[in-house]
Amino acid sequence: MQVTITAVGPDNRGLADPIVHYVTGVGANIHEIQMYDHDSERLFAMFLRLDWPADVEPIPVLRERIMQIGTQKGLTLRVWARDEQNRLPRIAICTTYRSEPAEAVLNAIKEGVIQAQPVVIIGNRDRCQSLAEKHNLDFHNIGDERGNPDNTEMVNLFDSYDVDYVLLARYMRVLPPNICWSFAGGRIINLHHGLLPSFPGFQPYEDAFSHNMLTFGATIHFIIPELDAGNQIIHQNAFAVSPGTPLKEIKRIGETQHEPECLVEGVRRVIDREVELHFHRVVGIETI
């Protein structure tokens, strides 16, 4: 059974050894291991993707032993296996202002296009609270009066709702590295309202328009701690406009029609396991 283990905490010596020795001692086959040591921040982070012998030791036992190591070493550890429980994947949807992408995903779930269970909507603004009420979902605003998020509360909510995947549906804040590491391995999906890598940043419509582009689009990609690493695109699509089309009309098409459609397809690919994230690259399951 494929299992991911993440560890985040204050940097120190000998943090990785007990985790690696334990899982290999039980008979796990490690497919991927990444470690991060940022001297200036005194932060240690580690990600393991492995094939776990669940017939030898059940996942709950693995989790208990890993948590014991975390307590001993002062690390926050998480053990995640999508196949551990016989249920639909649980999704947390994060938003800021625009509700169309999130609502498109919720409608696709109701229609059976996406085989998942939405469990909570989290915003750094109140704008999408009515969307949560419409779909009978809990809503939590983790932002202050300026929209600055409480990232600790965000992580606590992910854990309390037992979330499998985090969906950033036009969530207009950058996640800090510790959250990216905590849910590493393809568990955080982001909608970027522009074509990557050509138009990153917060104003891709305006940037493309200023370059006299006639093609605009959206990109669905996995989030990883290194923002400029690239190669994490799940799905990307574009739409063309006629010369002279005003920027306002371009943004209307993109925000209300194109972005939602693109996000639905990207989420579906992940939920249906057509793609996974291996070594910071998106790979098709049929090629593994």
Image (tube, rainbow, N blue to C red):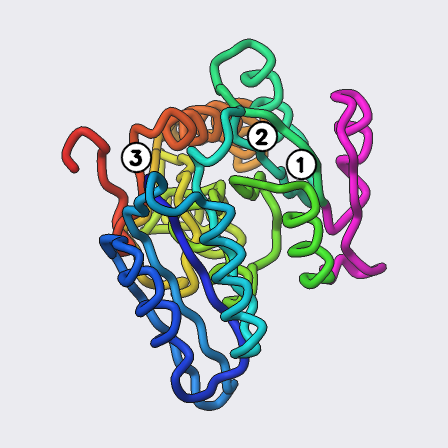
Against 223, residue 219 (above or below) is: above
* Residue 56 visible from this viewpoint: yes
In the picture, measured across the screen, residue 248 lies left or right of residue 214, that is right
Q: Which mark is residue 101?
A: 2
Against 260, residue 38 (above or below) is: below
Query: Which residue does the numbered mark 1 point to in the structure image?
Result: 98
**Residue appearing at x 55%, y 43% in the figure:** 166
> Magenta stretch containing residue 173, yes or no?
no
Q: Where is residue 38 in the image (x, y as percent from the top left)?
A: 43, 83
Screen quadrant of the C terminus: top left
| Amino acid on which the number 3 mark rests in the picture | Val
Task: Give whichever of discs 1 and 3 has the lower sequence position.
Answer: 1
The CA distance from mark 1 to mark 3 is 27 Å
The CA distance from mark 3 to mark 2 is 21 Å
Neighbourhood count class around disc 1 (C-alpha, 10 Å): few under 14, some 14–19, many 20 upward: some
Neighbourhood count class around disc 2 (C-alpha, 10 Å): few under 14, some 14–19, many 20 upward: many
- Label 1 with label 2: CB-CB less than 8 Å: yes
**Residue appearing at x 26%, y 49% in the figure:** 278
Query: Which residue does the numbered mark 3 point to in the structure image?
Result: 275
In front: mark 3 or mark 2?
3
**Residue appearing at x 39%, y 47% in the figure:** 57
The CA distance from mark 1 to mark 2 is 7 Å
Q: For numbered disc 1, what is the local secondary structure?
A: loop
| Closest to the observer, 25 or 285 | 25
Screen quadrant of the N terminus: top left
Against 132, residue 27 (above or below) is: below
Against 51, residue 26 (above or below) is: below
* Range covered by the magenta-colored residues: 123-149
